[in-house]
Structure formats: C-alpha cells, structure tokens
Image (spheres, helix red, strand yellow):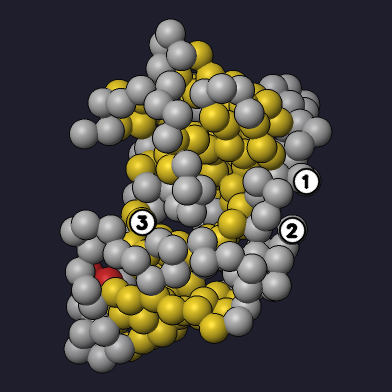
Amino acid sequence: QLQLQESGPGLVKPSETLSLTCTVSGGSISNSNYYWGWIRQPPGKGLEWIGTIHYSGSTYYKPSLKSRVAISVDTSKNQVSLRLRSVTAADTAVFYCARLPASMDRFDYWGQGTLVTVSS
Amino acid sequence: QSALTQPRSVSGSPGQSVTVSCTGTSSDVGAYNYVSWYQQHPGKAPKLMIYDVSKRPSGVPDRFSGSKSGNTASLTISGLQAEDEADYYCFSYAGSYTWVFGGGTKLTVL
C-alpha cells in the first residue's frame, strides 16, 4: 500500500525558507506513470495547489507562487521536497504531498499533512 | 488563476440527496473532463471521491456521483448518511500544467 509522509520543521521564522520532505513508501517515485504534488491548507481555509513534479525533473508551479517555490526529487531516498522562500504569516498552513497519475486528472494518494507555522 | 466557485455550505437530512456545485471557466472546468472531488473530515487528509467528472475510485459508495455541464461540475450525494458530513472540494486541470481547487463546501447532515 502506497504511503506518503510529510516531515519538516513545524515553526519557521518570517522571511526565512520553509523546507519540507515527503517520503514515499510502498512505491517508487521514479515510476514514470506518476507525478507528485504539494498542496497546502491554511487553518480553517481551503486547499491550494502549490506545484507538481515528475521524477524526470519536470516541474510545474502555481503562477502566483512560482517566484518563491522549488520542488525537487531525490530518487535515491524516494523523497519529494518543497522549498518556499521568504515566508510570511500568510504561508502558515498544513502542507500535504500527494500522488498525481500521469493522466493528470486527480490526486489519488495523500500524506497525512504537516502543520507549518510562520512566526517569530 | 482563480479558485473554482463552490457554495460555502449545503445541508440535508439523512436519506435525502444533496448537490454541491463547482463553477469554473472555459479554461478549466469547461475545457477538460478532469474534474475530481475530495471529501475532508476535520483534521484529516482529503480523500478522492470522484475523478474524471463522474468516475468513482474503488471503495467509494455509489451514493456519490458526479456530472458536468458547461463550466459547472456537480457532486451529488444520495441517501445522505451522518458520516457524509464533511468538507468537499472540487479540483480541475486548468491547462498549461496548472491545476486549481474550489473554495470548499461544508456539508451538514441535519
């Protein structure tokens, strides 16, 4: 059974860089049939797509976040990483990683999510 | 790239049917049959309920159905049960390798 687990600091200071890792087990992120995405959800608010990556290195970002976001993969560790620069309180959210089939039509497996708070 | 528009809340009594709408544009919902729906209970990760407008993943009850007309997609839940009370989000491919979620709808089972 595929499992995704997000990890990283739960507290980040304003203007610093938020870094999270998604460790995938029960399947390989190098499977060309899948993409991997990051989604966030501010407390009490809705879901927001952040970006998507294929193990080959192709990356796609939400236009409004593109200047601050970087998503990468480490195939040796079966991990997908997210970096969000110059964070503010508005970036406080639960961050989820999820799998997107190559059909690009849905996120079919999700991690449990991790809360990141931006505060000094 | 604006969020898809969903009603903030809907409600229904056990056994009844409810429909949640998701309105986009001719660039996202109207352009592709790549609309999916997610159920999210408090404190939990979203769960895929419908994909490709009307397909159900294995294990999702057939009480859940989806449809689309023009720029608006809909999720219908028939035979409402208490455990259906949750937030529901639509999601669509928006072209040029971008995707967009709806703002979410809170379903209350009365």
Q: Nearer the viewer, residue B106 or B51?
A: B51
Residue B1 marker = 2
Residue A30: x and y in percent read 43, 21
The amino acid at mark 2 is: Gln
Q: Is residue B69 left or right of residue B26?
A: left
How crowded is the residue under tag 3: few (<14 C-alpha within 10 Å), some, or many (20+)? many
Q: What is the C-alpha distance between the residues marked 3 and 2? A: 23 Å
Amino acid type at mark 3: Leu
Q: CA distance from mark 1 to mark 3?
A: 26 Å
- Please state which of residues A39 and A108 is positioned toward the viewer in this rendering: A108
Residue at mark 3: B48
Q: Residue at 47% across / 48% down in the picture?
A: A103
Q: Quadrant of the C terminus of chain A?
A: top right
Q: In the rendered view of the protein, which quadrant contains the N terminus of chain A? A: top left
Q: Residue at x 65, y 46 (%)?
A: B97
Sequence order check: which comes first, mark 3 or mark 2? Answer: 2
Q: Quadrant of residue A72?
A: top right
| B97 in relation to B47, above or below | above
